[in-house]
Image (cartoon, rainbow, N blue to C red):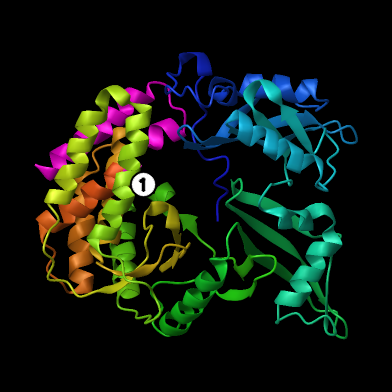
Amino acid sequence: MKSEIYSSPLPSPVSSIPLPPDEVLTGLPLLLDAAKAREALCAAGAEVEEGRIFYLRYKPKTSCIVAYEFARKNSETGEREPVIFYAKGTTTNGYLLSATKAENHRWVDVPFGPSVARWDEACALLFAFPNDAVLDVLRILEEPKKLQRFLYENLSAYPSDQWRLSDKRLNTELIRYKPERRAVFRSETKAIHHQTEEKRNVEVYWRVYGENQGEEVFRRMQVLKKNVSNQGLPVVPTPYSYEPERRILLMEALAGKPLLELLTTEAAASVIERTAAALAGLHRQFDEKLSVWRPRDFLVEASETEKMLGALLPEDAGQITKVRERLENQIPESKLELSFVHGDFYYGQVLIDGEKVGFLDFDRSHTGNSLADVGNFAAHLRLLELENRLPKTGELAQRWAEAYADWAKVEVEMEELKWWTALSLFFLSVSPFRRLDAGWPEKTREILQAVEEILC
């Protein structure tokens, strides 16, 4: 699995980025400027050099979380290495309460500065990874032996009375980080059998949740693994364990190349076909405990997206509302039976390993209309074209829809698929701001125009 924390484009200098009007979060311009954040950290005693923003979560007039990757010089090796901080900016009252709480908490010491620093000018606290106001369990990274014990407790294939898991060779890499929500890590080490001295490479992924949804994700992955293991399509990571106290889900590491890498090659048509076949196989599964999501449920989320877009682009609020209303007025009647739905299916959830197709991330899985997945994949293809990352995706999207219909043995009504595609693209219209793209207002308007074109 390729690291996603460094995969997004570098943001432009904040001076060239239009900022949303927010008279309550007065520190927003500072939060969205990595150079200003570095200045605040250095003033607090941190040893960091230039950096960038890699994650943004903004709630207008409420709070803003920004994650930064900076560089530091390791005093022992002399080499530059990345370090991660995040800032949480709130209202003045919210900031004072958070600062008081932070001052009375035990944090993980870091060698490059304070664990948590006040940033009064921005009404924000700056947290040095692995410190996190919600994901307190990240302190398991303090000592390799803590993580070693966690693996012993949760990897049944390597009981401690038979195997030794090396803590000295234990290497853990941060793959994805959403402060106060979720973190994904890859850990690898050597396992040595006590009697035979057999050596094995052990590689696992573990996922930390801010809420206890991981238990349900673990259950549904167990069901999937059991149901699809004999069919081969798709390949689903084996879920090893879930610890409710730590809220950690431990799972198998799947091999393969990210699908996006192959979409720019001559193999694009072939991997699209295989991905469609695997998705059709996933949709044939059944899990009676999954919640049922209907189009109206998605429109509740669309209303939240409308509010966010309206706050970002108040001059376009009327037009944004019209787009959301068109989605609501054009809900299609479906002849498709309810099925297992991945819930967030796009190229980033797919790994290709020869003829095998692996699927990741079942956090949003539900029972519903299978075209929610098909349309979401098509919307992400369209977004790649709008971002000039993949040219002329129309033909690829058509092949995708046709391949899915063939493998699923269903008749896909194009008007229905267009609706699901437009809905997903509407959700994606906040992407340019979240990445702090230069010219994000124009890019957002371009995406919304594409939504209207699909709905015509």
Q: Residue at x 23, y 65 (%)?
A: 404
Residue 92 horizontal/vertical position (percent): 61, 28
Residue drawn at the location 46% of the way across and 14% of the way down: 16
Q: Quadrant of the C terminus?
A: top left
Q: Which residues are magenta?
A: 427-456
Note whether 144 is above or below 280 in the view shown.
above
Residue in front for this viewpoint, 65 or 61: 61
Tell me if I can see residue 390 in this picture. no
88 w.r.t. 143: above or below:
above
Q: Is residue 114 one of those drawn in magenta?
A: no
383 to the left or right of 110: left
Please tell me in which quadrant of the rendered image residue 76 appears: top right
Residue positioned most to the front: 93
Q: Is residue 163 left or right of residue 354?
A: right
Q: Which residue is mark 1?
A: 265
Q: Amino acid at mark 1?
A: Thr
Q: Quadrant of the N terminus?
A: bottom right
Predominant SS along the magenta part: helix
Residue 287 in sight in this render: yes
Please state the horizontal and vertical placement of residue 425, each as a whole percent of the image.
28, 44
